[in-house]
Amino acid sequence: MPAALLVERLEKRYPGPPPVTALAGVDLEVRSGEIFGLLGPNGAGKTTTVGACTTRVRPTAGRVFVEGIEVQADPAGVKRRIGMVTQHNTLDRACSLWENLYYHCRYFGIARPEAASRADELLTRFRLADRATALPLTLSGGLAQRVQIARAIAHRPRILFLDEPTAGLDPQTRLALWELVADLRREGLTVLLTTHYMEEADQLSDRVAIIDHGRVLVTGTPAELKRTVGAGTVIEMQLDRFEERLLAELRAIRGVQQVERTAQGVRVLAQGREGVVPALVETAIPHGLRDVAVTEPTLETVFIKLTGRELRD
């Protein structure tokens, strides 16, 4: 069985001035039936990668295969096998919710009776039946995303691409969409999710790849990637003031593996908590220590360690 999605040495360069390299040799393999998270800050290359996988971006070099079909060789065949949801509302504003679903089915060659039945079915399933005649502009961001996901799967694709689908949504709506995506995977749908919310990828993804500057830095399960940090504890300390010598003082404490400056103070990666945290606090108090948070490593910790900097806006 071929991979659900295979990306080989994908490159995308835009002419200048100045010239921009959006992708610099991306390799990915997404297995059938898994949720695969593509993580990174804004501008890392996530959306360009998805664009190349969904026929919307023509790569400069490299190849993409969707269930064994090369995207550039047979874009129409690929479109029948994929669904796409972006962070922006792309619903037809002149059509009701029911019409958005119905005409999407018709666009993919589904006969009128089946298209109407499918629109009814999806509105009921996504708890939108009472809004069938509503127009998209009357919906909240969360409801609009539910309709967009319903539309994306209306023609029964094999792979669903979600490009930062929860950007700008409130926490409750984001959790509801997480549950919806997990349900779709349980039904056998393959999902590629791009996000810069590390918690989102950690909760949803079977495997993840972290991308930055158009290159894949690392791929693995969330647990595997968190183990690469080599630390059992992350200590975040907020300070009223910062002096460079504090970094050296903290690094000299036994059990400390890495110290880096943050916007609010410092972040420390340590082997454990016992004995380390009290020593860190004692050292930081003269520097105006305001708050201490002790957690386990996260995917964000992995990302920051790999890139050596904070996430970008």
Image (cartoon, rainbow, N blue to C red):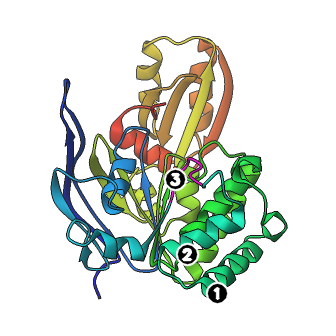
Task: Give the quadrant of the N terminus.
Answer: bottom left
**260 lies above or below 120:** above
Question: Hey, what amino acid is under mark 2?
Answer: Cys
Q: Could you tell me how far apart the alpha carbons at marks 1 and 2 are, in whole angstroms?
A: 10 Å
Residue ID at (64%, 51%): 93
Image check: 155 left or right of 79? right
Q: Could you tell me how far apart the alpha carbons at marks 3 and 2 are, in whole angstroms?
A: 19 Å
Camera-nearest residue between 92 and 29: 92
Pointer 1 residue? 113
Question: Hey, what amino acid is under mark 3?
Answer: Thr
Residue ID at (48%, 11%): 243
Pointer 3 residue? 86
Q: Residue 205: x, y in percent?
A: 50, 65
Is 110 contained in the magenta span? no
Quadrant in which residue 96 is drawn:
bottom right
Q: Residue 232: x, y in percent?
A: 51, 51
Image check: 306 left or right of 236? left
Q: Could you tell me how far apart the alpha carbons at marks 1 and 3 are, in whole angstroms?
A: 28 Å
Pointer 2 residue? 105
In this view of the protein, can residue 111 be seen by the observer? yes
